[in-house]
Amino acid sequence: MSAPSNAVDSIRLSIKILQDISNDIHVPKNIRRAVLDAIEYLQDTSVSPGVRAANALSVLDEISQDPNMPTRTRVQFWNVASMLEKVKD
């Protein structure tokens, strides 16, 4: 998987990864619900890409400390967070 070249690509790839998490039946429901909220923020075109990324990061940060999160999912969260932290206005 190559690195995203701009904010839109980062957001698009983040949404894809988060959708994969939301469809994983091994991920607890509360985490999947938070992931869906983050996806919703990322798809909100009424605000700038930087705001969309910041809103999604806020949701993901809250849930990332959940002790019930599978290790694989936690790594995916870190990857998404890393991409979204680079999105600026």
Image: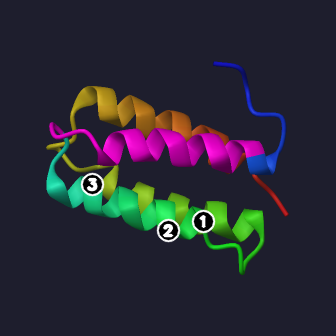
Task: Report whether residue 32 is seen.
Answer: yes
Q: Which residue position holds label 2?
A: 40
Is 38 contained in the magenta span? no
Q: Nearer the viewer, mark 1 or mark 3?
A: 1
- Point out residue 70 in the picture as x, y percentages from the top left corner: 21, 33
Q: Where, quadrant-wise, is the C terminus in this rendering?
A: bottom right
How crowded pointer 1 is (Cα within 10 Å; few <14, some 14-19, many 20+) is rated as some
**Where are the magenta residues, as a range?**
9-26
- Left or right of 24? Residue 25 is left
> In this image, 37 relative to 69: left or right?
right
Q: What residue would you read off at disc 3? A: 32
Is 24 magenta? The answer is yes
Secondary structure beneath label 3: helix
Q: CA distance from mark 2 to mark 1?
A: 5 Å
Q: Magenta segment, principal secondary structure?
A: helix
Per the image, label 1 sits on a secondary structure element best described as loop
Q: Is residue 43 above or below residue 66?
A: below
Left/right placement of residue 15 relative to residue 7 reads left
> Disc 2 to disc 3, how far (Cα)?
12 Å
Mark 2 and mark 3 lie on one chain; the one further toward the N terminus is 3
Q: Name the kind of residue labelled 1 in the image.
A: Gln
How far is mark 1 from mark 3, CA to CA? 16 Å
Provide residue 83's location: percent of width, then percent of height: 65, 40
Farthest residue toward the top?
A: 1
Q: Is residue 84 above or below residue 4?
A: below
Q: Is the image coloured rainbow, by chain, by secondary structure, or in one colour?
A: rainbow
Q: Residue furthest bottom?
A: 46
Query: Label 1: which residue?
Result: 43
Residue drawn 53% across the image and 62% down it: 56
Which part of the image, by quadrant, shows the N terminus?
Answer: top right
Tag 2 near tag 1, CB within 8 Å: yes
Query: Tag 2, which secondary structure?
Result: helix
